[in-house]
Amino acid sequence: MTRPDAHGALREELTRLHLELPRNGLVTWTSGNISARVPEGLLIKPSGVTFEDLTPDGMVLTDADAQVLHPGLSPSSDTATHAYIYRHLPDVGGIVHTHSPYATAWAANAREIPCFLTAMADEFGGPVPCGGFALIGGEEIGAEVVRVLRGHRSPAIILQNHGVFTIGPTARAALKAAVMVEDVARTAYLATQLGSPVPLAQADIDRLHHRYTHVYGQRPASPDSSAPAAPVAPASTSLQGEQHA
Ligand SMILES: [Zn+2]
């Protein structure tokens, strides 16, 4: 099959990234999806296809209003939500949606995930917010995601009675946030079972978040450095602050 567009490398990356959803325990059966912004609109998982059956050519290209641009598989039923987010948050280059169990358990209680952990302050800059209930299919979910996340430090939102949306400059960055939100949701849940977890002070959250987003991680070596330069990942795969050691 001839590729219907010039997004071959991105189609392959999206296929690989989707395999990380079941690998990290974030999805069941065909639920969950990842998209990436492209000049025409977006590329997204086809609807109802299991993760091991996904192929690069099966990723669905739509315009900015979620209308399919080439004949083929139908796009994810969440495509209108993704399109709405891209139209309203111009810095977003990738979006992930899951019903990952611990984060969604907080959503079922309509509770934000409190900021009990330094890793949460690093990654989310505070609690992970919980948006209101919105029905699936139209633009209501996208509107709620945009309402809460516009100008917010958190790249993740949990939606009441539903699940998780994460955003990032790339699909890979959004996937990292989806993995991290489930991890902190699990730890926060366990902490609440043990007793009364201690929230971090706002001033400490601010300091941790600033350090993580401005100082932490590998920096490119200076040109005159005598030390061997660390390999610099391409921008599309660079995860700022990925290493936690
Ligand atoms: Zn969903």
Image: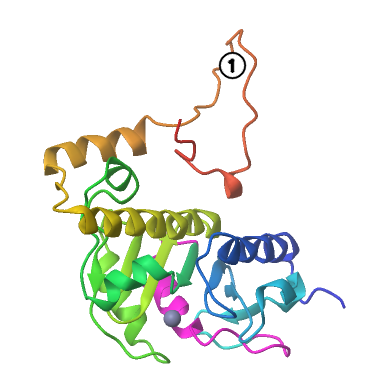
Q: Position of residue 164 (x, y in %)?
A: 38, 70
Q: Tell me the crowding category of disc 1: few under 14, some 14 to 19, or many 20 or more residues within 10 angstroms, Cα based.
A: few
Q: Is residue 84 visible?
A: yes
| Viewer-nearest residue: 157 or 182 | 182
Q: Secondary structure at mark 1?
A: loop
Quadrant including the N terminus: bottom right
* Image vertical order of residue 106 relative to residue 63, above or below: above
Q: Position of residue 54 (x, y in %)?
A: 71, 74
Q: Quadrant of residue 5?
A: bottom right
- Residue that carries the numbered disc 1 in the rendered image: 223
Q: Quadrant of residue 220?
A: top right
Magenta stretch: helix, strand or loop mostly? loop
Residue 152 in the figure: left or right of residue 168: left
Residue 60 in the figure: left or right of residue 161: right
- Say which residue appears at 20% left-offset and 40% top-offset: 206
* Image vertical order of residue 174 relative to residue 1, above or below: above
Q: Position of residue 143 (x, y in %)?
A: 31, 80
- Say which residue appears at 86% left-offset and 76% top-offset: 2
The amino acid type, in three-letter code, at marker 1 is Pro
The part of the chain drawn in magenta is 69-93
For ligand 1, the image quadrant comes to bottom left
- Say which residue appears at 50% left-offset and 59% top-offset: 175
Residue farthest to the front, as pictured? 194
Residue 92 among magenta residues: yes
Q: Is mark 1 within 8 Å of ligand 1?
A: no
| Viewer-nearest residue: 138 or 52 | 52
